[in-house]
Amino acid sequence: TGAFTYDPGFTSTASCESKITYIDGDQGVLLHRGYPIDQLAEKSSFMEVAYLLMRGELPNPNEYDEFVRTITRHTMIHEQLAMFYRGFRRDAHPMAIMCGVVGALSAFYHDSTDINDPVQRRIASHRLIAKMPTIAAMAYKYSVGQPFLYPDNSLSYTGNFLRMTFGVPAEPYEVDPVIEKAMDKIFILHADHEQNASTSTVRLAGSSGANPFACIAAGIACLWGPAHGGANEAALEMLREIGTPDKIPEYIKRAKDKDDPFRLMGFGHRVYKNYDPRAKVMQKTANEVLAKLGVTDPVFDVARELEHLALNDEYFIEKKLYPNVDFYSGVILSAIGFPTSMFTVLFALARTVGWVAQWNEMIEDPAQKIGRPRQLYTGATARDYVEITNR
Ligand code: CMC
C-alpha cells in the first residue's frame, strides 16, 4: 500500500525534464532541439545531428570539422576486444554480441568512467559514438566468417561503416553515394526519440552512477525486444511471410483478432496516434534506394498494399494505428544487403547518439537522483515463518 500513483507502462508519468527531443504524437511531429525530423533527414548528416543532440545547437563549419575529427580519432577498438568476439558461437544473434561487447568496453576505458568529470564524460561519449560502427560491423563479419576490417578514417562515419561491413581485404570497396546517403538518413531517423524504453533504461541505469559503457549496454538489451527496436526485424519477417498481396487480408484479420497474439509489426506506437513522421521519410527513401539498386522486391509491394488496406480498416482507424519508423526500414536495409538479424544492431548504432545525449543531460541535471519507482504491493500480509518439517 501507500499513496503512490499507479501507472503501468508509464503512460502518463514524466520521468525527467529534457531539452533534447519534442514529440507531438497527435499531430505526428518530431523535433530535435526544435528542428523538424524531415528537415534534418533531408538536409543534415548523422554527424551533424549527433552534434546537435549532444550540444544543443547546429555546429558552424569549424565546430563540425572538429567534431568529426574527434569522433574519427576514436573509431578503432582495442585489439584485445577483437578476441572477445571469438568466444561467441558463430550463429550468435548479433544483438547478443552487441550487449556483451559494448558492456565489455567498461573494462578497457578506465580513463573515461568517472561520470562526475565532464571531460571524461565527453571522451566516453565520443568513444561510444565512434566505436559503435566498428563493433557492429565486426558482429556482422564474425557471423559470416569474414575477417574484421579496420576503420578507414578517410571515409565518412557512414561510409566507413558500410566498408567495414561489406568490404573484404581482397578487393577495393567503393562506397556508393546513394547507399551512403540512405544509410545516413536511416541513422538520423533513429538517432533519438525522447523517453522510449531503451532511453529510459539508459537513464535509470545511469542514475545509480554506473559507467556509461555499462549503461549503453543496458539500453541495447532493452532495444532488442520485438515491441521496440526488434520490430524492424520482425516487420520484414512478417512481410516476407505474407509474401503476396492477396494474403494481406488474412493477416489483417489475424491482427484484429483478440484471441490471436499476432500484431502487425511496424504498426502502432505508444506516442504517435498519427502517421509517424519518420515513416514518411523512410517510405520515400525506400523508393529511392530500390530504384537506384534496380531492386524489385515483392516485399515492398506487400508493404505498400498492407499500409493502404490497414489505413482504411476501421480497427486501425479507431485505434489510431499507423505505420511507424520500422515499417519500411527493413525493406531498405534488406535491399542494401543487410541480413534481418543486423537490423536492430543498426538501430542500436544510431540510437547510441540519443542515449549518450540523454545520459549526459541526466547527469548534468541538478534535480537528478537515483531512479527508484515505488509499487502497489499486492502480496501476502505479514505471517510467521513455518519450519520446513511442518509444511
Ligand atoms: N497490430 C494490431 N493491433 C495493435 C497493434 C498492432 N501493431 N498495436 C496496437 N494494437 C492494438 C492493441 O491490441 C490494443 O488494442 P486494445 O485496446 O483493444 O487492447 C491497442 O491497439 C493499443 O495497443 P497497446 O499495446 O495498448 O499500445 P502500447 O502503446 O502499449 O503499444 C506498441 C505500442 C508499439 C508496443 C504496439 O503498437 C505494438 O506492439 N506494435 C507492433 C510492434 C512495433 O512495431 N514496434 C515498434 C515501435 S516504433 C520503434 C520503437 O519504438 O522501437
Image (cartoon, rainbow, N blue to C red):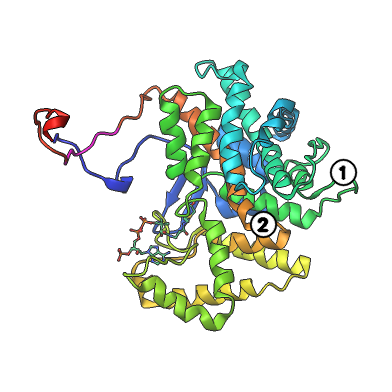
> Neighbour class for label 1 at 10 Å: few (<14), some, many (≥20)?
few
When asked about the image quadrant of residue 382, the answer is top left
Amino acid at the residue labelled 2: Pro
Q: Which of the pair 229/268 is nearer the observer?
A: 229
Q: Secondary structure at mark 2?
A: loop
Q: List x then y, in percent, for residue 309.
A: 48, 78
Q: Secondary structure at mark 1?
A: loop
Q: List x then y, in percent, for residue 8.
A: 28, 46
Q: Which of the pair 251/286 is nearer the observer?
A: 251
Q: Tell me what residue is drawn at x 46 percent, y 39 percent.
A: 199
Point out the residue furthest to the right here.
171
Q: Tell me what residue is drawn at x 58 percent, y 35 percent.
A: 100
> Neighbour class for label 2 at 10 Å: few (<14), some, many (≥20)?
few
- Residue underneath mark 1: 169
> Horizontally, is 58 left or right of 1 in the view?
right
Q: Tell me what residue is drawn at x 68 percent, y 72 percent.
A: 297
User: Which segment did they paint magenta?
Assistant: 373-378
The residue carrying mark 2 has its beta carbon less than 8 Å from ligand 1: no
Q: CA distance from mark 1 to mark 2?
A: 21 Å
- Residue underneath mark 2: 339
Rendered position, 233 above or below 158: below
Q: Tell me what residue is drawn at x 50 percent, y 78 percent.
A: 248
Q: Is residue 35 visible?
A: yes
Q: Quadrant of the C terminus?
A: top left
Q: Quadrant of the N terminus?
A: top left
Q: List x then y, in percent, for residue 27.
A: 42, 59
